[in-house]
């Protein structure tokens, strides 16, 4: 299903849930609606589903306006955060429910349920009740039930929120593979950026009711267009007066916020830095073990930066003087954004006489 949303506005009393939200979603794409809690993600999902009607703006499916169509007329499958399975029905009957409502023949229902049981890895569990299943198995039943009537659009409201971390990771991979195989346009709500980056073809970042940015995960990560996106995706440092740092003296964006990701910062002793002349001198304040690396907190020019350091390198200690090299900075003001590279990262070659 090809989806277009134009200038969606929705308020609940004095609270404005969405503010002039417009977007387009290509057929067959897996889209992550990402943002902090209360930002408007679920409201957008519910408007697409027909569970809420926008105060103004239009929703078009395949070019047809659907604002006033009821949910059952939109060709949508919906998976809720709490599964919403029928407790008195077996796995088979849960999956078959939508097909039964459509009054499909018993042969059609059996063939479709058998297909989905295989697809979702539920073979052998058909006669079990929901309370006899694990959280991951219940979620797979919910997915199978939602796609059984062959909807054109699948909507998922934080589908992995009630599942433990290990199973959640397994289900992410399974979901992406399943959606690619069945080819249904799918939109899922999440506040977990790792989940969105790993699963989605495209991410839509929603904040305070507005669409901050839409694009492929790698594009959003590498080219954030707003300070919120730069700070929300990945980890970041916010720095005042970036022109005081070596290599960024010519930063020219007026009244700009400078945001630096920890991976943009190289930290170490003098013999470890790739371009010493472009480095600042700082002091290590704290060092945190993060499993795959160290995260160092360092004070430079009266400001705090965080940087990553390999476990293979000599361990830094609080109080150590270190060289700090900033490779890249994101600059933002109200009207523009820039990505700046350190202008001093070319040490002159030695002159031999």
Image: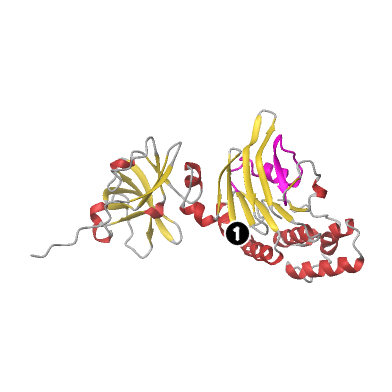
- How is this picture coloured? secondary structure
Residue under pointer 1: 199
Residue plotted at (84% across, 66% down): 127
Report the magenta residues as a range: 34-62
Q: Is residue 99 above or below residue 60?
A: below
Left or right of residue 319, residue 258 in this image: right
Residue pictured at 64% horizontal, 57% vertical: 30
Residue at the farthest top position: 14
Compared with residue 66, is residue 154 higher up or lower down, i.e. above or below?
A: below
Q: Position of residue 335 (x, y in %)?
A: 45, 37
Q: Can residue 38 be seen in this view?
A: no
- The picture places residue 180, in percent across and down from the top left corner, at 66, 65
Quadrant where the C terminus sits is bottom left
Q: With 337 as the anchor, is 282 left or right in this view?
A: left
312 sits left or right of 52 in the view: left
Q: Nearer the viewer, residue 315 or 34?
A: 34
């Amino acid at each position: 299903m090809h989806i277009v949303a134009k200038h969606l506005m929705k308020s609940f009393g004095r609270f404005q849930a969405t503010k002039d939200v417009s977007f387009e979603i290509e057929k067959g794409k897996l889209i992550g609606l990402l943002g902090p809690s209360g930002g408007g993600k679920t409201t957008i999902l519910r408007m697409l589903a027909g569970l809420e009607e926008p105060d103004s703006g239009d929703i078009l499916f395949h070019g047809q306006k659907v604002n006033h169509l009821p949910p059952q007329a939109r060709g949508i499958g919906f998976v809720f955060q709490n599964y919403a399975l029928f407790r008195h029905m077996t796995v088979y009957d849960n999956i078959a429910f939508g097909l039964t409502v459509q009054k499909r023949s018993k042969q059609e229902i059996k063939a479709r349920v058998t297909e989905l049981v295989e697809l979702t890895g539920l073979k052998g569990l058909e006669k079990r009740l929901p309370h006899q299943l694990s959280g991951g198995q219940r979620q797979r039943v919910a997915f199978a039930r939602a796609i059984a009537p062959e909807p054109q659009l699948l909507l998922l409201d934080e589908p992995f929120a009630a599942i433990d971390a290990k199973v959640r990771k397994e289900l992410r991979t399974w979901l992406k593979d399943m959606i690619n195989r069945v080819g249904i346009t799918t939109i899922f709500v999440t506040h977990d950026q790792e989940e969105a980056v790993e699963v989605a073809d495209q991410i839509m970042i929603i904040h305070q009711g507005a669409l901050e940015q839409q694009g492929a995960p790698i594009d959003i990560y590498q080219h954030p267009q707003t300070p919120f996106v730069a700070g929300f995706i990945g980890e970041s440092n916010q720095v005042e007066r970036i022109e005081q740092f070596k290599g960024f003296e010519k930063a020219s964006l007026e009244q700009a916020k400078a945001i630096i990701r920890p991976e943009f910062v190289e930290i170490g002793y003098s013999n470890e830095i790739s371009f010493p002349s472009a480095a600042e001198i700082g002091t290590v304040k704290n060092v945190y073990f993060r499993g795959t690396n160290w995260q160092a907190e360092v004070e430079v020019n009266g400001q705090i930066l965080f940087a990553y350091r390999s476990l293979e390198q000599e361990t830094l200690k609080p109080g150590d003087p270190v060289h700090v090299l900033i490779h890249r900075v994101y600059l933002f003001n109200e009207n523009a954004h820039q990505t700046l590279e350190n202008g001093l990262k070319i040490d002159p070659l030695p002159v031999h006489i």
